């Protein structure tokens, strides 16, 4: 099941999978958003700039503690982009996830100038408009609608994730994991992370807003994930996160994407999610 919180501007959502009931963490495509088709994306200068941008993000994200933002081009041709991997993901998995995100963006949003792609382990975003440092409230919830939790655990879980949301903005990378002992009902595992271009106070607002907005959707579930443009949260009844921090100089591989970006020209059907 999906639940959406969409701001006043139009966002295009193409596809999103339901949560699988499996006790293992895997990197899956959680969804993507594309702006309306823009024929100017076929201009050579835009395609070259986009290829350069994606190449830079793919190369540098895993090398910079899993986060990197940059711009390519000048004046009206400038493109802004960032990539961020989950804080517990290794540099090698960060690099692989980034490449997968780029492939999805180029295939499914080839005519769009504003693109966001979420995988379980990473987030890719680029736009022809400046968005660095701006808290974006759009988010979407990913849940299994039949996986209900015991009534006695529901309130504990929400309080627990509230504490995770309070703690994450205070951490060096605005990333935090925690474990809740629910007694005879086992343990619950929580995680929260903000994109590192926004300030800590906005990170706190972002996570708080997600919990409030999706409370009725996630409140009684044993597992859920909320993905947003500026922050994301995860909650499961199994340990999905790893005790791994991203190294600063390991696991990344150089990938050239210029040719791929220039060569993509297929049209994609778009479905509007109205405010």
Image (spheres, rainbow, N blue to C red):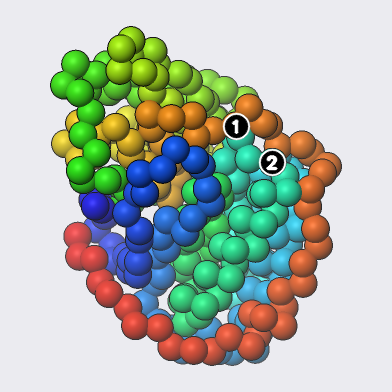
Q: Which corner quadrant of the image does residue 46 belong to?
A: bottom right
Residue under the image location 67 percent in, 31 percent down: 244
Q: Is residue 237 above or below residue 140?
A: above
Q: Is residue 69 above or below residue 236?
A: below
Instruction: Kindly identify which residue carries mark 1.
Output: 242
Instruction: Kindly identify which residue carries mark 2.
Output: 90
Indicate the secondary structure of the residue bearing disc 2: loop
Mark 2 neighbour density, 10 Å: few (under 14) some (14–19) many (20 or more) = many
Which one is nearer the viewer's eye here, 130 or 248?
Answer: 248
Give residue 35's mark. Answer: none
Which of disc 2 and disc 1 is earlier in sequence? Answer: 2
Query: Horizontally, is 103 left or right of 225 in the view?
Result: right
User: Where's residue 227, x and y in %?
Assistant: 39, 47
Which one is nearer the viewer's eye here, 3 or 198?
Answer: 3
Q: Which corner quadrant of the image does residue 241 belong to?
A: top right
Q: Is residue 259 above or below residue 63?
A: below
Indicate the secondary structure of the residue bearing disc 1: loop
User: How far, Cα to Cα, is label 1 from label 2?
Assistant: 9 Å
Q: Are marks 1 and 2 in contact (CB under 8 Å)?
A: yes
Q: Is residue 152 visible?
A: yes
Which one is nearer the viewer's eye here, 218 or 65?
Answer: 218
Residue under the image location 46 percent in, 68 percent down: 114
User: Where's residue 165, x and y in %?
Assistant: 40, 25
User: Where's residue 169, x and y in %?
Assistant: 49, 26
Residue under the image location 36 percent in, 18 percent down: 186
Residue under the image location 73 percent in, 62 percent down: 56
Mark 1 neighbour density, 10 Å: few (under 14) some (14–19) many (20 or more) = few
């Amino acid at each position: 099941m999906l639940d959406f919180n969409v701001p006043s501007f139009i966002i295009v959502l193409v596809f999103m999978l339901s949560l699988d009931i499996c006790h293992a963490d895997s990197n899956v495509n959680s969804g993507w958003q594309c702006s309306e088709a823009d024929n100017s994306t076929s201009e050579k200068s835009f395609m070259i700039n986009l290829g350069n941008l994606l190449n830079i993000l793919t190369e540098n994200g895993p090398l910079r503690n899993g986060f990197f933002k940059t711009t390519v081009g000048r004046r009206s041709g400038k493109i802004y982009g960032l990539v961020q991997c989950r804080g517990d993901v290794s540099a090698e998995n960060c690099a692989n996830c980034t490449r997968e995100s780029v492939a999805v963006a180029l295939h499914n949003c080839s005519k769009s100038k504003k693109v966001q792609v979420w995988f379980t382990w990473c987030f890719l975003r680029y736009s022809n408009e400046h968005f660095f440092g701006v808290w974006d409230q759009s988010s979407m919830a990913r849940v299994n609608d039949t996986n209900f939790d015991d009534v006695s655990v529901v309130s504990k879980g929400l309080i627990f994730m509230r504490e995770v949301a309070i703690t994450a903005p205070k951490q060096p990378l605005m990333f935090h994991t925690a474990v809740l002992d629910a007694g005879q009902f086992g343990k619950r595992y929580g995680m929260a992370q903000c994109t590192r271009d926004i300030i800590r106070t906005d990170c706190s607002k972002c996570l708080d807003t997600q919990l409030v907005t999706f409370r009725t959707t996630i409140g009684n579930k044993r597992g859920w994930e909320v993905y947003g443009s500026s922050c994301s949260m995860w909650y499961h009844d199994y340990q999905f996160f790893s005790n791994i921090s991203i190294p600063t100089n390991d696991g990344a591989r150089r990938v050239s994407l210029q040719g791929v970006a220039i060569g993509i020209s297929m049209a994609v059907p778009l479905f509007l999610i109205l405010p």
